[in-house]
Amino acid sequence: MSYHHIPVMLNEVMQGLDPQSGQFFVDGTLGGAGYTTNLSQAVGEKGKVLAIDLDDSAIKNAQKIIKERGIKNITLVQDNFRNLEKIVHQNFNQFQVNGIVLDLGLSSAQVDEAERGFSFLKTAPLSLAFAKNETEDAAYLVNNLSAKELTDVIARYGEDRFAFRIANAIVSARQEKPIRTTTELAEIVVAAVPGQFRRAKIHPATKTFQALRLAVNRELESLELVLPQAVRLLAPGGRLAIVSFHSLEDRIVKHFFKDQIKTCVCPPETLICNCHHQPVVKLITKKAIIPTAAEIKNNPRSRSAKLRIIEKLK
Ligand SMILES: C[S@@+](CC[C@H](N)C(=O)[O-])C[C@H]1O[C@@H](n2cnc3c(N)ncnc32)[C@H](O)[C@@H]1O
């Protein structure tokens, strides 16, 4: 199957990272290799791009592109970007990079590949995992977590006000038989929400599926773990660009960036600063960059994207 993904805000990301010939970049979320191949061209044969993805479909697709185009400066690593420093140190005898990009979440290819279970509109095993060998997938969670744990997951990661009702409906349904497929779960969620919300513009199962996906892949935890590593790895003048797709991710990025530029990190009750904290980065984007109307029209999946960039001080 061909791997399809339109890179989101490609021009804005490339302008923001400003890659130069001979430099070294890391793409922590290879996906359809849109950013990776553009970075590879910009840094040229003396430069390097290290591209990471958990999903072997993304890696295989990129291997094919690299072979077809005879590209020499891209290294592919199938791993979790939460291990960023280790991956960079192991693959290159190098401790500083000129830029890092993370384009969070899913690629269109993953959504379109029905058997991955990312879409509840097609019947498929309930996986929702980026890495195909994940054992604690969504089916595991819905069939094993307690009602309280499921409520917490759906409320926290899906911000769904019907979390309690949905969690209890899941627990009673699984007493009849285990929940195995995407559409079985979607039907349980639809039946659990009050009647007037069943035909809402946004499908009632959307938030539950987002919540389970975030939980299965521990996505927010990975993001929290990678951010300080990325700042440590950046060379002076190097940039970190992050594209996020929902408010939970964007909040983490925004707060992390704000904390990084603070000149004082003393506890709030301290009257006179004694931390002498020196920021090591500056904000390149004061406000998040969002896609243009033309991009959203051409690629509706870009509509919720937000791009934030910081630069390591020289
Ligand atoms: C939105 S796509 C990236 C698209 C890419 N920028 C492009 O231009 O084609 C996100 C990719 O990140 C991968 N991914 C998500 N979380 C990851 C993680 N923690 N570690 C490694 N890869 C991850 C997904 O498997 C997916 O392929």
Image (cartoon, rainbow, N blue to C red):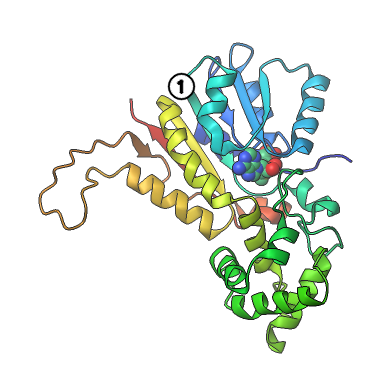
Across and down, in percent, residue 22 comes to 55, 14
Residue in front for this viewpoint, 153 or 268? 153
Counting other residues with Cα less than 10 Å from the Cα at mark 1, is it few (<14), some (14-19), or many (20 or more)? many
Q: Which residue is mark 1?
A: 96
Quadrant of the image containing the N terminus: top right
Residue 224 % position (x, y): 48, 46
Residue 290 showing in the rendered view? no
Label 1 near ligand 1 (CB < 8 Å): no
Q: Amino acid at mark 1?
A: Gln
Q: Residue furthest left?
A: 272
Whether residue 125 can be seen here: yes
Toward the viewer: 160 or 22?
Answer: 160
* Rendered residue at 65%/67% (across/down): 207
Residue in the image at 48% along x and 35% along y? 240
Residue drawn 55% across the image and 24% down it: 88
Is 100 located above or below residue 185 in the figure?
A: above
Q: SS class of the residue under badge 1? A: loop
Q: Quadrant of residue 63?
A: top right
Residue most extreme to the right: 1
Residue at left offset 50%, top offset 36%:
16
> Residue 135 versus residue 39: which sits nearer the camera?
135
Residue 202 against residue 291 in the figure, above or below = below
Q: Quadrant of ligand 1?
A: top right
Q: Position of residue 65 (x, y in %)?
A: 79, 26
Q: What is the residue that sits farthest to the top in this orientation?
A: 46
> Which quarter of the picture shows residue 171?
bottom right
Picture coordinates of residue 294 (x, y %)? 66, 52
Q: Quadrant of the C terminus?
A: top left
Left or right: 99 with respect to 67? left
Count numbered badges in the picture.
Answer: 1
